[in-house]
């Protein structure tokens, strides 16, 4: 085995780190959002309790997962179904460009958007 252009092990490791990082970050804002807001889906008004709160997810209003103001203004609690719906709408919007809301940045939902950032400054 000689050197290849890409090292799949290394890539796999970076992706695993990224997933762990995303999971940690998500846990952080999720806990905050669940403290801040009543456990109700913002779309279908379904109510949640400790038994099923796993199905309640935090949606980012501007679709930028790095935008997490502590006042919760960029978060919306949605059940997993409405959350899916919300994202497919957004994907369609990005893909087919409907309407005039051109200020919405299409790249922010890229799961690797912050990968470079993370590599640049090894905080944590
Ligand atoms: Zn819902
Ligand atoms: Zn979302």
Image (cartoon, grey):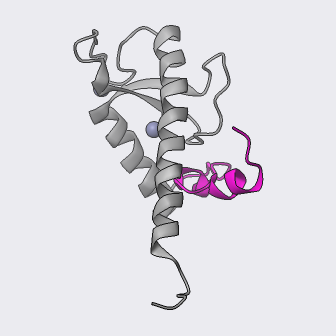
Q: Is residue 38 left or right of residue 54?
A: right
Front residue of 107 and 111: 111
Q: Position of residue 65 (x, y in %)?
A: 57, 40
Q: Residue furthest front?
A: 1
Q: Residue furthest right?
A: 121
Q: Position of residue 35 (x, y in %)?
A: 49, 9
Residue 95 visible? The answer is yes
Question: Which quadrant of the structure image shows residue 112?
Answer: bottom right
Front residue of 76 and 51: 51
Q: Main secondary structure of the magenta part?
A: loop
- Dividing the image into four quarters, tell me where ligand 1 lies: top left
Q: Residue at x 27, y 35 (%)?
A: 81
Image quarter in which the C terminus is found: top right
Q: Is residue 80 left or right of residue 19?
A: left
Q: Position of residue 29 (x, y in %)?
A: 54, 25
Q: Residue at x 53, y 51 (%)?
A: 18
Residue 83 in the image: above or below residue 33: below
Q: Is residue 42 magenta?
A: no
Front residue of 100 and 58: 58
Q: Residue furthest bottom?
A: 2
Question: Which quadrant of the structure image shows residue 28?
Answer: top right
Q: Is residue 101 magenta?
A: yes
Which region shows up in magenta? 99-124
Q: Residue at x 53, y 10 (%)?
A: 36
Residue 60 visible? The answer is no
Q: Position of residue 121 (x, y in %)?
A: 77, 49
Residue 68 in the image: above or below residue 48: below
């Amino acid at each position: 085995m000689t050197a290849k252009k890409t090292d799949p092990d290394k890539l796999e490791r970076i992706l695993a780190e990224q997933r762990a990082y995303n999971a940690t970050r998500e846990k952080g804002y999720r806990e905050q959002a669940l403290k801040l807001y009543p456990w109700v889906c913002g779309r279908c008004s379904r109510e949640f309790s400790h038994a099923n709160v796993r199905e309640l997810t935090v949606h980012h209003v501007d679709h930028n997962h790095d935008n997490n103001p502590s006042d919760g203004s960029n978060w919306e609690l949605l059940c997993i179904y409405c959350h899916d719906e919300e994202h497919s709408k957004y994907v369609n919007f990005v893909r087919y460009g409907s309407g005039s809301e051109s200020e919405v940045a299409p790249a922010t939902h890229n799961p690797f958007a912050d990968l470079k950032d993370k590599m640049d400054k090894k905080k944590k």
